[in-house]
Amino acid sequence: RKEVEQDPGPFNVPEGATVAFNCTYSNSASQSFFWYRQDCRKEPKLLMSVYSSGNEDGRFTAQLNRASQYISLLIRDSKLSDSATYLCVVSTGRRALTFGSGTRLQVQP
Amino acid sequence: EAGVVQSPRYKIIEKKQPVAFWCNPISGHNTLYWYLQNLGQGPELLIRYENEEAVDDSQLPKDRFSAERLKGVDSTLKIQPAELGDSAVYLCASSLAVAGTGELFFGEGSRLTVL
């Protein structure tokens, strides 16, 4: 079983739609959680951290459910520029980040 | 401020040939990572350095892969000999502190094609 699992998609949504991605992780000792964004043929970049209480950054909302070991990302009012692959990332203490395989989002006009 | 710099951006070699990738992290970043990314997959850690010390190389295939960060700044990743399955993007990343902050800054990657 992979440490971090994501639905690969693609999620094809129209502009303005709300879309949500989930991610599950297997290591209950995981302590830090993040979403990274990766555009086609580009490097990954940090989108946002995920906190236990949930957090929001503009149109993006991240939630963590430690009991069920899953993380979610909600994007409201999708823009064409949101089209990318979203990587769920988990860290266990001092170990390096473990990346999921990513969920591809395609926002259509 | 310059980001993480990698070279070469692209490399095409025949199998059994050697190849080397170079990375210069963001100035002041003590921790340096080499990740491998296959098409449609997320980055997978190969090795992590804190300063010049390799603190996590458990995923590095040591029979053919080697890495060094001699002065705790730039780093080189070598493959010798390359195999067809090594075709991938090799990403270098750096961070100020150990992994937990999540603030990894990646270079543009070195795309390797092994024929």
Image: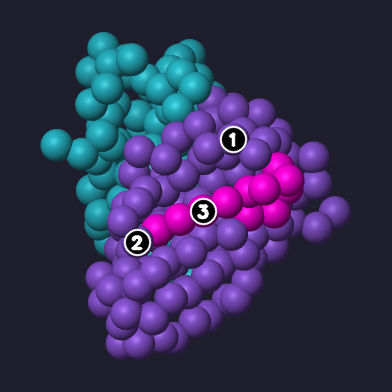
Residue under label 3, please give it.
B67
Q: Give me the residue at 28% from left, 16% from top.
A: A28
Q: Does B68 appear in magenta? A: yes
The answer to whether residue B26 is above or below residue B103 is: below
Residue B78 location (% of width, % of height): 48, 64
Read off the magenta span.
B65-75
Q: Amino acid at mark 2?
A: Arg
Q: Give me the residue at 62% from left, 64% from top.
A: B22
Q: Secondary structure at mark 2?
A: loop
Check the image and name the residue furthest to the left: A1
Q: Give the chain ID for the cyan colour.
A: A
Q: Give me the residue at 44% from left, 86% from top.
A: B12
Q: Which mark is residue B64?
A: 2
Q: Which mark is residue B53?
A: 1
Work out how far the residue at label 2 is from the one at label 1, CA to CA, in angstroms: 20 Å
Q: Amino acid at mark 3?
A: Ala
Q: Secondary structure at mark 1?
A: strand
Of all chains, the one bearing label 1 is B
Q: Colour of chain B?
A: purple
Which of the image's four quarters has the C terminus of chain A?
bottom left
Looking at the rendered structure, whether the residues under marks 2 and 3 are on a common chain is answered as yes
The answer to whether residue A11 is above or below residue B93 is: below
Work out how far the residue at label 1 is from the one at label 3, CA to CA, in angstroms: 11 Å
Q: Does B50 appear in magenta? A: no
Residue A20 location (% of width, % of height): 34, 42
Q: Amino acid at mark 1?
A: Glu
Of all chains, the one bearing label 2 is B
Of all chains, the one bearing label 3 is B
- Image quarter of residue B40: bottom left
